[in-house]
Amino acid sequence: MSYWIESEKLNKKFYSSDLFNFKKGQSLFKKECYHVINDVSFKLRSHCVTGFVGANGSGKTTLIKLILGFIKKTDGVLNYPLDQNQLLNFKTKIGFLPERPYYYDFLTPYELLKYFWNMQEPNLQEPNLQFNEIFYRVMKQVRLSEKYFHSKIKVFSKGMLQRVGMALALIHNPEYLILDEPMSGLDPEGRYLVKKIIQELKASGKSILFTSHLIEDVEELCEDILFIDNGKMIYSGPLETLKSSYHNESLMSVLNAISARHLGESQ
């Protein structure tokens, strides 16, 4: 069994300063430590859809930023399936959809995707295909109608913007995908479309990690699951193994039971 990312006892701490009372003779600033990711260990299986769940503020986005290299870990191990000299090349194979993407809304989908396409080194692009071929292929994947290819993004609905974001994540034909809340704020039709895209990507051999508060979607799409709470990894592994240990109850019921038990242990 192969993995595309592994971590062991991964930690991330942030520091902040608070204003103190001058009249009491205390220092103006006090440095405080916030342990956002706490001894987190997990493995992401290749060619597998992994759901990443947890409450707001539990550490999901911070962990994604660590994986992508946007922030540095405090300590612990974060392994990729290659040596460090190849790490940059590995990260060019990751497609990323952030939870709150920002688009240049004065551009059209065609202009936006071409801009990001040109940022990639030519030798890392698909050598036998021109941009237009790639663009039309990706637009077909995300089901964005041709009549919108040259429309300004500022007039797009939430669902259409999400399709543009998915297209940006796919434009370089990545082997790995990290999707942060890809179905957030979408209507049922939009959710169905994004789920369909994820299923098709999985069938084509992609390795996918996505976060979601929509537990029923996670249960429908995922083979593996990561469950994080207050910066600690509560469960990492196959979804069926987790459910079978709770008599195959729904995933929502299982996560509620685990949360209640974990809360009781921490008190």
Image (spheres, rainbow, N blue to C red):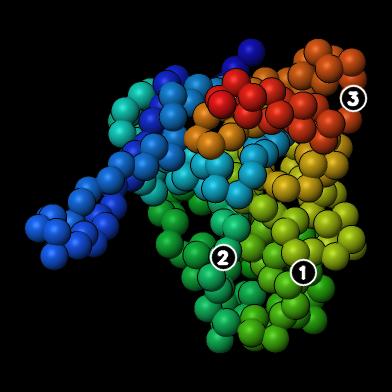
The residue carrying mark 3 is 249
Q: Is residue 37 above or below residue 116?
A: above
Instruction: Decide if residue 37 is in sight here.
Output: yes
Residue shown at 43% from the left, 40% from the top: 36
Horizontal side, residue 4 vs residue 220: left or right: left
Residues under labels 3 and 2: Cα distance?
A: 35 Å
SS at circle 1: helix
Q: Tell me the mark number nearer the camera, choosing from 3 and 1.
A: 3
The x and y percentages for residue 101 are: 56, 65
Q: CA distance from mark 2 to mark 1?
A: 13 Å
Judged from the image, the secondary structure of the residue bearing numbered disc 2 is loop
Q: Residues within 10 Å of mark 1 (few under 14, many from 20)?
A: many
Establish if 102 lies above or below 249.
below
Rendering quarter of residue 165: bottom right
Left or right position of 139 against 83: right
Is 111 on the left or on the right of 184, as rendered? left
**Looking at the figure, which quarter contains the N terminus?**
top right
Give residue 101's mark: 2
Three-letter code for the amino acid on which mark 3 is drawn: Glu
> Going from the N terminus, do you reach mark 3 or mark 1 first?
1
From mark 3 to mark 1, how far is it between C-alphas?
32 Å
Say which residue label 1 marks: 159
Q: Residues within 10 Å of mark 2 (few under 14, many from 20)?
A: few
- In the image, residue 149 lies at what x, y percent? 71, 78
Tell me residue 70's x, y (percent).
39, 48
Q: Nearer the viewer, residue 193 or 245?
A: 245
Residue 143: x and y in percent read 81, 64
Query: Extreme left residue here?
Result: 25
Q: Earlier in the sequence, mark 2 or mark 1?
A: 2
